Image (cartoon, rainbow, N blue to C red):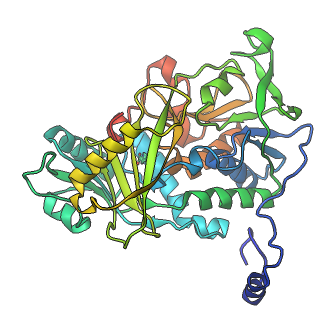
Amino acid sequence: MARHGYKYSAGKLIRHGLTRGDWPRMWRRPEARSSYDVVIIGGGLHGLATAYYLAHNHGMTNIAVVDKGYLGGGGSGRNTAIVRSNYLTPEGVAFYDRSLDLYNSMAQDLNLNVMFSRRGHLTLAHTDSALRTMHWRAEVNKLQGIDSSVIDPQEVKKQAPSLDVSADTRYPILGALFHPPGGIVRHDAVVWGYARAADHLGVHMLQETEVLDILCEGGEGPDGKGAGGRVTGVRTSRGDISAPAVVNCTAGWASLISNMAGVPLPITTHPLQAAVTEPCKVFLPTVVVSGSLHVYVSQTDRGELVFGASVDPVGTYRVNGTLEFTEELAGHVLELMPGISKMRLLRQWSGLCDMTPDYSPVMGTTQVDGYFVDVGWGTYGFKAGPVAGETMAETIATGRDADLIAPFTISRFTEGDLVGEKGAAAVGH
Ligand code: PYC
């Protein structure tokens, strides 16, 4: 039997299910200690993966993951679960490709079926300039051994027969970037898998525990915060916890949390809306993205179509759904797939996205000793979760930015060394 999870024989599992016996909890609800070696703020995919890899790869188990809500209640439970590595920059391609590797072996590694479905990913081009960007991405991808190529409308039709590829549409499909390794994963299962495995290795998950301040000393700012200082712990709604290392793995509130350490972030926060239809027979075999029409869509194993769009244009912390989003989405999706006009939308939701100027994350060490960031995940946080956890764990354990995240550290904004990924964002923002 694998390391994490229930240690039951098949017979015992069936008996347990039939008798509705007491199922063991996936993770404990421990009392907080007064000190930990590492406190991770944010109990989403990134925070849990960081905790898991710290424990699993580096033997560090005196770790707390604190969250003001419940595990996976933020962006990890609100995204559209798409994974891919067909980015535009060599740095981005290498980083997201490692994440795909980790997604590929995750079910075995965490002993939980995370329903990874490698089904291919199409990014449609409706203009000559979009087609040029797809060729550019394909060449960058191929140089790094990524399966990615530009295909013509007839091949697009073979991959996704429900798409209208005729030339007389309002936004004709001129071609697409085709990325066979892309797909979707069950996002909740990924969170549960990391949480259960981290718990099994001794990590404390402290839910409903809000971080009110990050405690520092020696820095140039008020209360010893800011450059040149070092972290000493966190103040939470359940009391102070001391720790020599504090990691900001939050999304939505990343800049507010970072201000608590005196480390301002170049981030603006915008809502991102999504929607899902009633289930129907599976007819869409790939993930389909249209940057020009600001839409992406995939079909779950249950048969629902899951749609997303670009972030809302105005920065805010509100996560209300809007009618404008639904109308625009429906209009654009029906341009691509007129055949689904009778399908009904079931639900709509939104989450918060922390957008950086170059559409790449901010990761690693900072100007405050012991304060680490894994933030700025815009609309790409889910696909990066595993590799972000793995590389952040290495960075925290060694005190040195892991090679894969060295291009994404905060210093790039002062050194003018941006990693421009706007051309590979799923949609225009
Ligand atoms: O970057 O693939 C992407 C994506 C999908 C949904 C939001 N972003």
Residue 404 lies, in percent from the top left, at: 53, 42
Q: Is residue 187 left or right of residue 241?
A: left
Q: Relative to 241, say whether 80 is above or below.
A: below
Q: Is residue 350 positioned above or below 246 on the image?
A: below
The residue depicted at 47 percent of the width and 69 percent of the height is: 302
Q: Which of 192/401 is in front?
A: 192
* Residue 375 appears in the figure: yes
Q: Is residue 2 left or right of residue 310?
A: right
State the residue in front, 224 or 316: 316
Q: Residue at x 48, y 25 (%)?
A: 315
Placement of the N terminus among the 4 image quadrants: bottom right
**Residue 145 visible from this viewpoint:** no
Q: Image quarter for residue 220?
A: top right
- Residue 170 against residue 120 in the figure, above or below: above
Residue 249 location (% of width, % of height): 65, 38
Q: Locate residue 157 relative to residue 199 in the image: left or right.
A: left
- Residue 148 image offset from top left, x and y in percent: 30, 56
Taking the view exactly as shown, the residue that stands out farthest to the bottom is 11
Q: In the image, what residue occupies the spot 74% across and 39% down?
A: 68
Number of numbered labels in the structure image: 0
Between 131 and 219, the residue placed more toward the observer is: 131
Residue visible at 77% across and 25% down?
A: 214
Q: Position of residue 177 (x, y in %)?
A: 26, 52
Looking at the figure, which quarter contains the C terminus?
top left
Q: Residue furthest left?
A: 168
